[in-house]
Amino acid sequence: MNVLLTVVLAVQMLTAIGMIGLILIQHGKGADMGAAFGSGTSGSLFGAAGSANFLSRTTAILATVFFVTSLGLTYIGTLHGRPQGLMEGATLEKAAPAAPKPPSDVPQPNSASPTGSAPAGAPKSGEVPK
């Protein structure tokens, strides 16, 4: 199962990088209007209108593959709980360390002293501290 997870993650990352590159290469709708009036060059590797169809179709195919791999990762994650090795050292996954217990021979701040009187400087009962 771990190999399948690795393969699906690799395909998804390559698809995402491919989509980013193809989207950045494509011209906006305003660029076609400028080329029609002669302000830009309309010649390209695929012809005047061929690049839009090729790049648009390739982007749509990559988007579909990205969507399918996202669904596959979701299915793998819910099928077996948390994927092993993915969040191995996550901070939220670790239990909070317990506070260390003080040694028993050290008197606690709010406890009475062994002689029965209050610690030095402590207010007497009924007295409001200043």
Image: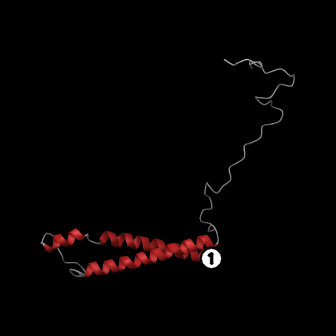
Residue in front for this viewpoint, 10 or 110? 110
| Residue 18 visible, this orientation | yes
Q: Is residue 22 above or below residue 101?
A: below
**Relative to 79, is 110 on the left or the right?**
right
Q: Is residue 123 left or right of residue 105?
A: left
Where is residue 76 shown, x and y percent of the image? 59, 73
Viewport quadrant of the C terminus: top right
Mark 1 — residue?
1
Quarter holding the N terminus is bottom right
Instruction: State the image quarter where residue 7 is shown.
Output: bottom right
State how the image is colored: secondary structure
At x 83%, y 20%, the residue is 117
Which class describes the residues within 10 Å of circle 1: few (<14), some (14-19), or many (20+)? few
The residue shown at (34%, 80%) is: 57
Question: How far from the left and from the top, in percent, is residue 19?
Answer: 38, 72
Q: Give the farthest residue toward the left.
A: 38
Toward the viewer: 41 or 64?
Answer: 64
Circle 1: element type: loop
Q: Position of residue 24 (x, y in %)?
A: 32, 69
Residue 107 relative to residue 84: left or right? right
The answer to whether residue 39 is above or below residue 92 is below
> Residue visible at 56% across and 73% down?
6
Which residue lies most toward the right here? Answer: 115
Query: Which x, y percent locates residue 56?
Result: 32, 77
119 is higher (above) or lower (below) than 93: above
Residue 14 lies in what quarter of the image? bottom left
Residue drawn at x 31%, y 78% is 55
